[in-house]
């Protein structure tokens, strides 16, 4: 996990955008409101997938804009 993923503001932003995108995808799939364990599990996996995707994109953007950034360091 990079330092960027440990920042609260990044987690809040990535979590909000991921939840919004997952709700949009589920709505387009015909599941407007998750009801039941299977639909909530699907929503959870959608959120996790979008979250990891946005984390990768943010990491690549920081890498391109500021390659020596301390946000890219992993511990």
Image: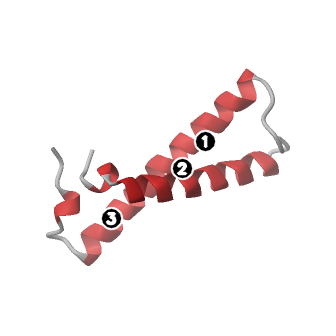
The circle on residue 31 is none
Where does residue 15 sit, x and y in percent of width and height?
52, 51
- Asked if the residues shown at circle 2 and circle 3 are in contact, with their CB atoms under 8 angstroms apart, the answer is no
User: Residue 12 at x, y = what percent?
Assistant: 47, 54
Q: Secondary structure at mark 3?
A: helix
Separation (CA) of disc 3 from disc 1 = 21 Å
- At x 80% / y 49%, what residue is drawn? 27
Q: Which residue is mark 3?
A: 60
Q: Earlier in the sequence, mark 3 or mark 1?
A: 1
Which labelled disc corresponds to residue 50?
2
The answer to the question of whether label 1 and label 2 lie on touching residues, with beta carbons closer than 8 A, is yes
40 left or right of 6 in image:
right
Residue 31, given in percent of the width and then of the height, sits at 82, 41
Residue sitting at 74 percent across and 30 percent down?
A: 39
CA gap between label 1 and label 2 equals 6 Å
Q: Secondary structure at mark 2?
A: helix
Query: Is residue 3 depicted above or below 42 in this figure?
Result: below
Query: Left or right: 42 with respect to 29?
Result: left
Q: Which mark is residue 46?
A: 1
């Amino acid at each position: 996990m990079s330092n960027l993923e440990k920042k609260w503001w990044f987690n809040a932003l990535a979590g909000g955008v991921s939840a919004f995108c997952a709700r949009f995808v589920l709505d387009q799939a015909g599941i407007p409101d998750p009801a039941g364990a299977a639909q909530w599990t699907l929503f959870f996996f959608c959120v996790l997938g979008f979250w990891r995707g946005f984390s990768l994109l943010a990491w690549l953007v920081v890498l391109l804009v500021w390659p020596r950034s301390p946000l890219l360091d992993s511990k």
